[in-house]
Amino acid sequence: MNQVFYNGVSSLIQKENILLKEPMKRHTTFRIGGEADFYLKPNGIEEMAKLIKYCNSINMEYCIIGNGSNLLVGDEGYRGAIIQVFDNKNHLRIEGKKIIAGAGALLSQIANFAWENELTGMEFAAGIPGTIGGAVVMNAGAYGSEMKEIVTKVEAVTGNGEIIFLTEEELGFGYRMSIFKKRPLIAMEVTLELEKGEKSMIKARMNELKEKRVKSQPLEFPSAGSVFKRPEGYYAGKLIMDAGLRGFRVGGAMVSKKHCGFIINVGDASAKDVKDLIGEIQDRVREKFGVMLEPEVCMIGEF
């Protein structure tokens, strides 16, 4: 254990929020991943700011995660600090037609909160298995809508531990892209601008999209959602299917037969299984169609 780092972190956050040699398979929707040297859960934005400033001051490698829904951690683990924005940063409040959400709040949680308060615009995200912080970072979207349509402000922490506010224009949203992918910033609180709606219609739309997901996605297996970004002019799932990879398997990792854009953990898959399967898919699709699929899943640690 890095005793110097442990002592430093212990002065910044509560000791019960410092986990050592934490198995990351407990914290990813893939249910895969080796041990993280440190797993930290700061309480609130002030602790996060101090923690980030400290990590950067001593060149400690770190990675910010939400609920691990878009993450593959190597089998040999992560030699640094995993900093979680989930358990201690998931508050919700309402101000007129605005919802202010802690970065750790689940999208499903926020969609239900919006419905309860007769606000529409969040229905598309109700079934995305992630946090609002992660959704902002990657400008998550589904069924023709994206986060950029409803996010108006984000409170963030910089690499120097400063707390800043980013406006809609400053967020730099693009397809699966935001300013957070270009600069060392951490989303901590998100303001959403929604519209008043009819409660029954909002619920009906949420149920309609839920039914579509259940029918088209392998929700019964551990996965990280769609593995690849949508290549311009194509659909990744169809390219994979047309390349003859439906049901193709490497170890415990398999291309879903239900939706070829998903890789599922069908039985104690390793991170290496998933990574090797991603590479095989990329090679086959490139050979057959001349298209290079770009992973949407974030891969960290030692494989």
Image: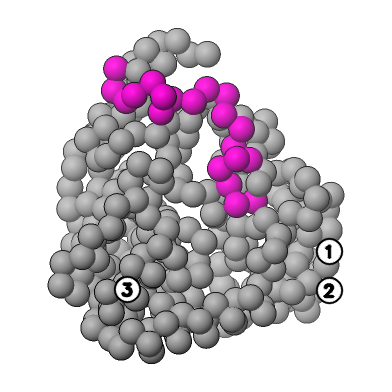
Is 165 rendered above or below residue 259? above
- Location of residue 97 in the rendering, given as x and y in whole percent from the top left corner: 19, 74
Residue identifier under label 1: 248
Name the colour scheme.
Answer: one colour
Q: Give residue 32's mark.
A: none
- Left or right: 43 with respect to 209? left
Label disc, if present, on residue 116 of the rendered structure? 3
In which image quadrant can residue 119 be found?
bottom left
The secondary element bearing badge 3 is classed as: helix
For residue 49, above or below residue 239: above
Asked whether the viewer can see residue 283, the reply is no
The residue segment tinted magenta is 11-30
Give the mark nearest the N terminus, 1 or 3: 3
**Image point (35%, 18%), residue name:** 10
Q: Identify which residue, 207 or 151, lies in the foreground.
A: 207
Asked which secondary structure carries label 1, the reply is loop
Q: Nearer the viewer, residue 279 or 55?
A: 55
Residue at x 56%, y 43% (from the top left corner) = 27
Q: Residues within 10 Å of mark 3 (few under 14, many from 20)?
A: few
Report the residue marked by disc 2.
Answer: 244
Give above or below for 184 relative to 110.
Answer: above
**Image quadrant where residue 280 sits:** bottom right
Is residue 247 rendered to the left or right of residue 13? right
Residue at the location (69% across, 36% down)? 75
Q: Amino acid at mark 1?
A: Phe
**Residue type indicated by callout 3:** Glu
Which is closer to the viewer, label 1 or label 3? 3
| Distance (Cα) linking label 1 and label 3 | 42 Å
Q: CA distance from mark 2 to mark 3?
A: 45 Å
Query: In the image shown, does 61 or 128 lie closer to the viewer?
Result: 128
Q: Residue at x 30, y 36 (%)?
A: 43
Earlier in the chain: of badge 2 and badge 3, it is: 3
